[in-house]
Image (spheres, rainbow, N blue to C red):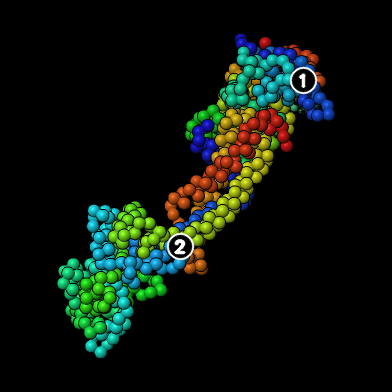
Amino acid sequence: MSTVLDVDAVTKTYDTGAVEVHALRGVSLTVEQGEYVAIMGPSGSGKSTLMHILGCLDVPTTGHYRLAGEDVGTMTEAELADVRNRRIGFVFQQFHLLSSLPAWRNVELPLVYAGLSRAERRRRALAALERVGLGDRVDHKPGELSGGQQQRVAVARALVSEPALILADEPTGNLDSTSTDDVLGLLRELHDQGRTIVLITHEAEVAQAAARVIRVRDGVVTSDEPTDSPTGVTA
Amino acid sequence: MTWRDSFGTALGAVRSHKLRSGLTMLGILIGIAAVILTVGLGSGAQDKVRSQISALGTNLLVISPGSSTASTGVRGGLGSSTTLTVSDADALTSKVVAPDIEAVAPTLTSSETLLNGTTSWTSSVVGTTADWASVRARTVSEGRFLDAADESSDAAVVVLGSTTASELFTVGDPVGQDVTVDGVQLQVVGVLASSGSTGSTDDDDTAIVPMSTAQQRIFGGATRTEVQDIYVEATSGSTLAGAYQEADDELLQLHGITTAADADFTITSQQSLVSTATSVDKTLTVLLAGIAAISLLVGGIGVMNIMLVSVTERIREIGLRKALGATPSLIRRQFLLEASVLGLAGGLLGLALAFVGAAVLPHLISDPIAISATASVAAVGTAVLIGIVFGVYPASRAARLAPIDALRSE
Ligand SMILES: Nc1ncnc2c1ncn2[C@@H]1O[C@H](COP(=O)(O)OP(=O)(O)OP(=O)(O)O)[C@@H](O)[C@H]1O
Ligand SMILES: [Mg+2]
């Protein structure tokens, strides 16, 4: 098994003018291909910051991050955009759907930048929505969907390009238990297909879905151990 | 991402903010319509003057006796009251001397009373040669014009202007009838077609006789070889200057004058009349076009303003698109296209408004407006260019945003 994510002594410092905020104070971890990892920690511990670095949306202040063996620090903006497009599927903490576009248009966005034909995009977007159980809501705009449905649209968008890596930041944060189970079920399926999944959560039950839990506190990793989840692939 | 996708995205963005896009386009629209209309007004005025002048005869030079250059007034010729003669005109007809001259028509004009029985009418009687019709761009509606045989035989024939003809012959066909001028009986051989000129003098109130007849039989006396004006037609518009030079050189030589400043004749071109007439219009057009251009600039700044607002308002969208794989150049393209769509739509609507204006305005200001295709294409092109130029800054601002900063901004 090859190493997909290799985080090496990464720090992230935000300079807010008056004070420097040390969001990450030296994080090192590796994730193998096909793993299902949960990152847990209290609010403000640096989970989202870590995910943004893993997803090439942000760069470390110091330290190195290698994605599938390639040092992200040496890539150009356009190369990073290409990596995000082809390798990574994001599910954001705040959904980040475009309110002016119907669900299927939101879902097809990664495929637009991948350069697929219109017909192919629509076909795959509809299939992805079908898969998250929103086959009858494809033409609804985000404002016309419930929070759980919006989150499922976001999941559909993350899986539509069939990326090898799925980064999900609190995908169940705003959901009731039924919707939570739906989303976790989807992630489980994706994992079963061999995709690498990094799931951020502060709920212990949600973290139990993963095979491995990394705990973060004040910008450092405090523990990194397998769960007793039977479905996990141990590292 | 294909251009078509980028275009679709840009169009969608423009459509989803209808009011704002509409107001932005309004700025461009007014500017473009103003530019097209002022240019149209200017060229309409020029067309009008040009058509008035070409009605007099195209590529025309008029040689008149005396000098108008000297401030001391009209300078007389070598011991005679008028300085142009039939032989001057004859010399200019030579293709060797004046290759750029197509036709020459000397004229001798006098106001005379014409009689048809007891009906009388005072008209301007012009003695000239057969070339007059071509030089002055006139045709006959009935009968024929004068010919060379009339000239050589001092024929007692006359061609009437349409006004003169209808005054003298209220009933029946004038061709073949006789009229009497100064006791000389002349046969009407033709009637000129109306010149259609709307000038202050009636070009149709005239009677044309052969030059020789006028000199020998009608006017008589001291005018036997003298002519008043010589009309010269150049072979084409481009040879007008050459024809001018040839006529000037030849006449100076014939009159034995060594310095051009001492010339005892004056050559005027219709072109010089046109340029005087149009230069006033041009100044006005430039002024108006300047104002229109400024309004276009203001429209462009409006586009920039809206695009900046659009970028700021859609920072999260930009961040998301980048997170999902949009490269900086694709983001730039999207916003540039959006600005161009605003410019293009504004430009096309402005063009439409200009056409409406061109149809309505002439009724109010009695000036013609000629909208040219090139001006229209150029104006719409300018509108798109304005969109692009003023969209560049907002677009590159959008493209430079770091994805995560954009995503996290509120
Ligand atoms: N752009 C920023 N500028 C300054 N400080 C920031 C910025 N982004 C995050 N931080 C700070 O970095 C720290 C970590 O933030 P982060 O969003 O990673 O936390 P988190 O673990 O995801 O929290 P939550 O569970 O609430 O989502 C916080 O103290 C936060 O205030
Ligand atoms: Mg977070």
Residue found 68% across the figure and 20% down from its top: A54
Residue found 54% across the figure and 37% down from its top: B6
Measured along the vertical axis of the image, is residue B277 above or below residue B4?
below
**Quarter of the rendered structure image containing ligand 1:** top right
Q: Amino acid at mark 2?
A: Ala
B136 displayed left or right of B153: right
Q: Is mark 1 within 8 Å of ligand 1?
A: yes
- The location of residue B193, given as percent across then percent down, is 28, 71
Q: Amino acid at mark 1?
A: Leu
Residue B295 shows up from this direction: yes
Residue A180 shows up from this direction: no
For mark 2, what is the residue? B277
For mark 1, what is the residue? A24
- The location of residue B50, given as percent across then percent down, is 40, 61
Q: Decide: few, some or many residues near mark 2? Use Cα within 10 Å; few <14, some 14-19, many ≥20.
A: some
Residue found 78% across the figure and 14% down from its top: A223
Q: Nearer the viewer, mark 1 or mark 2?
A: 2
If the image is split into quadrants, where does the N terminus of chain A sit?
A: top right
If the image is split into quadrants, where does the C terminus of chain A sit?
A: top right
